[in-house]
Image: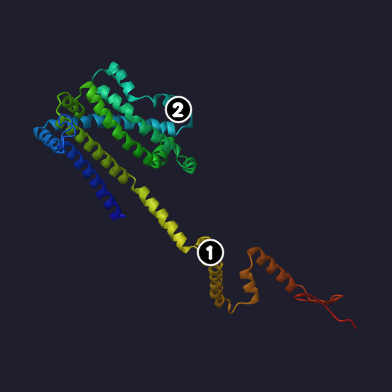
Amino acid sequence: MRGGAIIWRVASFAVAAGFIALWQAIASWKLVSPVFLPGPDRAWTSLVRGFSSGDLWSKLFGTLEHMAYGWLAASIAGIALGAMIGSSRLMRTYVAPSLEFLRPLPVSAIIPVAIAAFGLTQAMALFVIAFGAIWPIMLATIHGFAAVEPRLYEVARSLQMSRLAVIFKIALPSASPDILAGMRLSLTVALILAVVCEILAGLDGLGHWVLLSARAFRSADLFAGVILLGATGYVTSVAMSLAEQRLLAWQHISRTCRRDDCQSTARHRPDHQGAAPHDQRGRAGRVGHREHGRARSRPRRQGLTEREIRSREMPIGAVRAAFSFEQISEATPRTPSVHGERTESGFSHSSRD
């Protein structure tokens, strides 16, 4: 398992190296004008120069700040609204039409409204990023709360737990996988919208850096900014995935325990239950298994009376009926009848004189 993951990781880096080599070949052969497509070497040189001068550091921190603030606001609002809607059927009934009206709205249509309301400010960027990033989190939270096992709610009612206790102790841990998955998706949306807001509003960040480089035909700086944005998105996604694995370690442990239980149950299952219909042993194997069981049980029958042996082979109801019949038979005196003499096995006709 570990070796396979390493092989896939190496293969993914090999594919990325192949794309970079292809990019370098196209730029070296000048299939596209160097004004519009610089080589990876020129983009790397511009990236190093930008970090050395300190310009890219400030741009990077500005983009991360916009993304983080908008994502945190969307996470808090999305989890709170999703918990209220997902845990209440009445809320889902009344709020669902409004959500279906707002959810399909593109964020690009909200940007002019935000500019008219807040101007070209940081508040506008915060509102736009939060509006676009809230939907994956809120929908995932609603789904997670609605998918909680109903028996857990019954247990909470029997324990007389309050509504807040049910949410924080039962519903929220059960819905945490869906919530974290929605937060990881919304993180990418927040980065995209942060760059869009920086381009439109002229805010300090990598989006503004890319826009100025494109207007000045500094293609190397333009591609350096694009590479840095891609690296930022990859690093934040990997960090969120690691945090998700750390927070959901209990889920992996429970799955492993369930798998081990299933495997142990399959190992202890008899051959005639676990064998497939097309097994080559077929009926002979099952008969052999039964004969082996009978052979193992024969030595244990030595020293037992016939009555105890019959009681072990018959069902419980038959055992009770047999014991009661035999007790009645033993207590009843044996008297000769008109047609014959009564014995333990029934009536035997006597010969006439």
Q: Which residue is situated farthest in the right direction here?
A: 353
Residue 154 shown left or right of residue 16 in the figure: right
Q: Which residue is situated farthest in the bottom direction here?
A: 353
Question: Residue 67 at what x, y percent from top left?
Answer: 25, 31
Q: Which residue is mark 1?
A: 272
Q: Which residue is situated farthest in the left direction here?
A: 53
- Name the residue located 75 percent from the left edge and 75 percent from the top edge: 345
Question: Residue 61 at what x, y percent from top left?
Answer: 18, 32
Question: Residue 103 at what x, y percent from top left?
Answer: 39, 27
Residue 83 shown left or right of residue 213 in the figure: right
- Quadrant position of the C terminus in the picture: bottom right
Question: Residue 13 at what x, y percent from top left?
Answer: 23, 46
Q: Which residue is mark 2?
A: 96
Vertical placement of 179 versus 127: above or below? below
Label 2 sits on a secondary structure element that is: helix
Residue 294 shown left or right of residue 77 in the figure: right
Q: Amino acid at mark 1?
A: His
Q: CA distance from mark 2 to mark 1?
A: 53 Å
Q: Earlier in the sequence, mark 2 or mark 1?
A: 2
Q: Nearest the camera: 148 or 45?
A: 45
